[in-house]
Amino acid sequence: MRHLFSPEGDQALDAVMRLSPLLAFDFDGTLAPIVALPHEARVPAAVSQALAHLGARWPVAIITGRSVADVEPRLGFHPRYIIGNHGAEDPELGPPSSASQALDSIRHRIEARSEVLRRSGIVVEDKQYSLALHYRLTHDPGAALVCIEELLQGVEPAVKRFGGKCVVNVMATGLPDKGDALASLVQREQAGGAVFVGDDVNDEAVFMRATPHWLTIKIGREDPLSRAMFFLDSDAELVEVLERMQALAGT
C-alpha cells in the first residue's frame, strides 16, 4: 500500500473521479471514530456535511457491519444507499433468505451461557442477519476469546465467523459480503468506477474484489497483507480526502 497523499495517490483519485464513480464508505473506524460503547458512535459534522455535498453530484453509499436501522440515524446526512450486516442487508433487495434462522442455534447457546459471557466482559449484539461478540471492554481479552471460541465450537459450515477490532462476527455462510455489495451497487448505478474507504478485516472483501476502475483506501497502515491500493494514517485524514473530492467536483 502507498499513502493516498502522494503523487501516485493524487493521480489515482483524479482518475477515478473522472469516471462518475459511486462513493462508498465503511462506518465504524472510517466515517465514525471507534468508541468504547458502539451506541455512542456518530459521524463528525465536518464529514457528514462533506458527504452531503458530494451526494448531490455522485451516488454515496454506506456499507457497514451494523444493521441499516442502527447506522442510519448516526450519519447526519442521507446517502443514496445504506447496506448493512457486512453486505448481507440490502433494503432494495429484501431480507436474505433464512439468514436469521441459521443463527438461531448460536442464539440458544448465547442464552444458555449468558452469565459466563457477562462475567467475561463480552457484549452480544444481535443484528438479525449477523451477531457481533464484542470484547473491547473486557479486562482479559485472551480469556474472552477463549470463551467465544468455546461458544462457537462446531458451528461451521452453516455459520461462518470473522474477526474485527475487538469483535468476533458471526453470520450464515453464502450471504453477500461487502465486495458483493459494492459490485452490485456499481452495476445498479451504471457507475464508471468506485471509491471505497474502509478500515477492518471485513473490508478486505472489497479490496480483493476491486477492478482497475475502483480506488480502494484503507484507514491505517498496520496491516502489510491488506489488499487495499492506498492507505490513510487515520480517519482524521478522511476530511481532507473529501475536500479533495469536492474540489475535483467543483462543489
Image (cartoon, grey):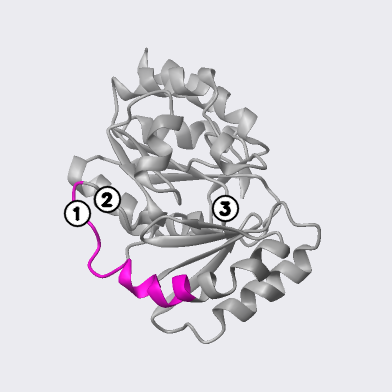
Q: Give the secondary structure at mark 1.
A: loop
Crowding around mark 2 (Cα neighbors within 10 Å: few <14, some 14 to 19, many 20+) is many
Image check: 33 left or right of 169? Answer: right
Q: Which residue is tagged 1?
A: 94
Question: Helix or strand or loop: what does disc 3 sit on?
Answer: loop
State which mark lies toward you, 2 or 3.
2
* Amino acid type of the residue tagged 1 in the rendering: Gly
> Disc 2 marks which amino acid?
Asp
Distance of mark 1 from mark 3, alpha carbons? 26 Å
Q: CA distance from mark 1 to mark 2?
A: 6 Å
Q: Is residue 98 magenta?
A: yes
Q: Nearer the viewer, residue 71 or 46?
A: 71
* Residue nearer the viewer, 160 or 147: 147
Q: Amino acid at mark 3?
A: Asp
Residue furthest to the top: 251
Q: Residue at x 47, y 37 (%)?
A: 12
Q: Residue at x 65, y 60 (%)?
A: 122
Left or right of 170 in this view: 194:
left
Q: Are marks 1 and 2 in contact (CB under 8 Å)?
A: yes
- Residue position for label 2: 90
Residue in the foreground of this view, choosing between 137 and 93: 137
**Can you name the residue that lies furthest to the bottom here?**
154
Q: Which mark is residue 22?
A: none
Label 1 vs 3, first from the N-terminus: 1
Residue that badge 3 annotates: 200
- Magenta residue span: 92-108
Compare marks 2 and 3 and give the one earlier in the sequence. 2
- Which residue is rendered at x = 61% and y = 50% of the image? 1
Q: Nearer the viewer, residue 135 or 207?
A: 135
Q: Quadrant of the C terminus?
A: top left
Q: Position of residue 44 (x, y in %)?
A: 55, 23
